[in-house]
Amino acid sequence: MKALYLHIPFCLRKCPYCDFFSVTRTSPLFQEFPRLLIAHLRLQAERATAGPFSTVFFGGGTPSLLSPSSVEAILAEVDHLFGLEGEAEVTLEANPGTLSLEILSGFRAAGINRLSLGLQSLQDDKLKTLGRLHTAAEGRQAVGWARRAGFDNLSCDLMFGLPAQSLPQLMADVEAVLSLQPEHLSCYGLTVEEGTPFEELQRQALLHPAAEDLATEMYVALHERLGDAGYGHYEISNYARPGRACRHNQVYWRRQGYLGLGPGAASFSDQGWGARWEIPPDIDRYARALREGRDPRTHLETFDRRGAMAETLYLGLREAAGVDEARFRARFGQGVAEAYPAAVHKAAPHLVYENGRWYFALSGWLLYDHLIQNFL
């Protein structure tokens, strides 16, 4: 395992569209959590082989609520127990409303070298709709502080398909974000997730995300404008300048092994056909297990050959690079079309085979959820 994911499950306030596991910072476990995470690292080091890590990702939640000294202590323990490669990519997700120049300088000194900023929009009315705590001005200020703190690998999140959002409004947002010159952009269409406040608002007909045809138009416009601006559309929702793709996420999409720690995190072993574990999203259970010296993970699934084939395509076809036919055949004893003739036929012409690789055209990404079902 070369990738480490650390789930930091605390937020100032949960956004109404988010279904990731988190609790508020008022939790009595907030102050103890860095020590719990270090205890988990030590327990894991005793029981399994992993590392040295080439990527580390602090996700959440809002990892930027941690103090720089806590982040430094966690990374020092990771390096001591498992090792960190010299050019390791170390990412921290951050909410602009939790930052200052001093905090960002502290994170940079602690070893964070890639910052993922949850801007979501640079328009105040859209930020209010999304329940974000920061303003557009604070988002711009956070980017400026990040540059002054020495971050030269900056990713910004942008959401589209928002209630009452027009295409010109979205493109104005895009231009505003481009003016900040981030190295990476993650662009997500708003989806109403089960169990969120947005789901309840939609049920009451009080929330109306963009219609499907408008969301499609927005997706295509993003693809074209960001491509013109020099960003490669390397995964369904992600764009990067050359050499700035998120190496950590590529581990997931390429079905390589990774270790996940923290409540709500998952781990994957690529030995055999693969196996996955999860840590239940319950911070009290997590704390009890670690205090008692018990592994908080539970086994989720062990794959057979057919399941591994399906997940290889499910993940790999998210990337523009797609799935290498020769590697797939060497791994599974069949080519993609041989293993899934009906699915390949149904996916045409959106599924392309070229230069020994299978990949979705842009139209295939627009229909991804529908087309990929044929392979599962």
Image (cartoon, rainbow, N blue to C red):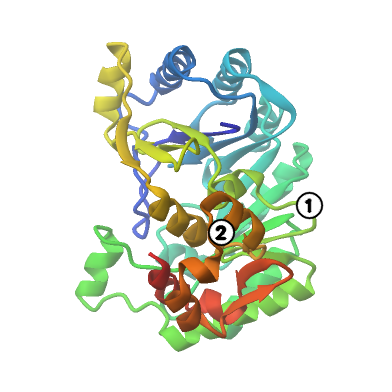
Disc 2 secondary structure class: helix
Quarter in which the C terminus is drawn: bottom left
Disc 1 secondary structure class: loop
Is label 2 or label 1 in front?
Answer: 2
**Left or right position of 151 against 92:** right
**Left or right position of 131 against 173:** left
Q: CA distance from mark 2 to mark 1?
A: 19 Å
User: Which residue is located at x 70 percent, y 53 percent?
Assistant: 245
Q: Which mark is residue 243?
A: 1
User: Which residue is located at x 33 percent, y 29 percent?
Assistant: 297
Q: List the residue tagged with mark 2.
A: 316
User: Which residue is located at x 61 percent, y 43 percent?
Assistant: 248
The three-letter amino acid code for the residue at tag 1 is Gly
Q: In the rendering, at what x and y percent does residue 33 appear?
A: 40, 23
Of mark 2 and mark 1, the one earlier in the sequence is 1
Query: 75 above or below 160?
Result: above
Quarter in which the N terminus is drawn: top right
